[in-house]
Image (cartoon, grey):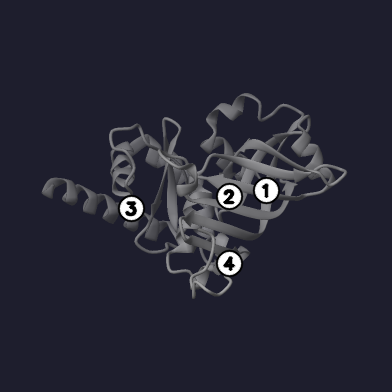
Amino acid sequence: MGETGGNASEPRGPARPLPAEEAPFDAIGLARSLLRGIRSGALATLDSDGTPFASLVTIATDADGTPLMLLSRLSAHTRNLLTNPRCSLLFAQTGKGDPLAHPRLTVVGRATQTMEMRARERFLARHPKAKLYADFPDFGFFALDPEAGHLNGGFAKAATLTREQLLLDLTGAEAVVAGERGAVEHMNADHADALALYAAGSGAEAGLPWRLTGLDPEGMDLMANERTARVVYPERVSDMGALRKSLVAMAARARASDAQG
């Protein structure tokens, strides 16, 4: 299963994942979807003697896709990171059947504590129950600065990604980042019907109380009953005016599609 094709009489070596830009599928799109959509994953750190240590953590993302975590200094993985920030984080999609048939992404890099208010806001929007302990003195927010990624999209779908391919370039879209929180609050308060249309249009389950947890120049993140949906705009937006036009057009198309169906 893990070998390359060739003459049966010749020795065959293990298949190597292709760079994302050479993969015969949308490796970058799938990787970014996993980054945005998975709310918990396996964090691997290094003990002081170099022993690998894996644990389960909850995850959110910054506007550019940087993984965010809320960690307690009482936990072994946090003590490890404070000594050696090198780590990896596994984002795995679950579902029915063989777990290895579902896509997963491993991101390697360095995780350090961040005091950025946006990191706090985006994490708590994704994990509202964490507000109960986020301000405890032993807790802090950590950001994993990616160095590379390894994507397994299922059988015969593997690719490697660079930092630039994992993260979204925010250059020229600073206004969207700055206006995110206000837009999120407005959409949740006044446009729940549109959020439901966006979720259904992305293939997510209809009829759930979808709410917006974050948005960026490429798309928006929705959540309902612990389920997530990533909605990608038809094209990148760079300012709030373009964002509003895109959302209105998306809602209109979704309503028209429903009417025809």
Task: Give the farthest residue toward the left.
Answer: 260
Dividing the picture into quarters, in which one does residue 155 lie? bottom left
Horizontal relation, residue 114 to residue 17: left or right: right
Q: Report the Cα–Cα distance between label 1 and label 3.
A: 29 Å
Residue at the spot 87% in from the left edge and 43% down from the top edge: 48
Q: Earlier in the sequence, mark 4 or mark 1?
A: 4
Rate crowding at label 3 as few (under 14), some (14 to 19) or many (20 or more) other CA atoms within 10 Å.
some
Element carrying mark 2: loop
Element carrying mark 3: helix
Residue 247 — which label?
A: 3
Q: Report the Cα–Cα distance between label 4 and label 2.
A: 31 Å
Q: Report the Cα–Cα distance between label 2 and label 3.
A: 21 Å
Horizontal relation, residue 106 to residue 109: left or right: left
Task: Give the farthest residue toward the right.
Answer: 49
Dividing the picture into quarters, in which one does residue 98 lie? top left
Residue marked by disc 1:
143
Q: Confirm whether residue 25 shows in the render.
A: yes
Q: Amino acid at mark 4?
A: Arg
Residue marked by disc 4:
16
Q: Earlier in the sequence, mark 1 or mark 3?
A: 1
Residue 236 at what x, y percent from top left? 42, 63
Residue marked by disc 2:
62
Horizontal relation, residue 42 to residue 22: left or right: right
Q: Earlier in the sequence, mark 3 or mark 4?
A: 4
Q: Report the Cα–Cα distance between label 2 and label 1.
A: 8 Å
- Between tags 3 and 4, which lies in front? 4
Rate crowding at label 2 as few (under 14), some (14 to 19) or many (20 or more) other CA atoms within 10 Å.
many
Residue 213 at what x, y percent from top left? 47, 41
Q: Are marks 2 and 1 in contact (CB under 8 Å)?
A: yes
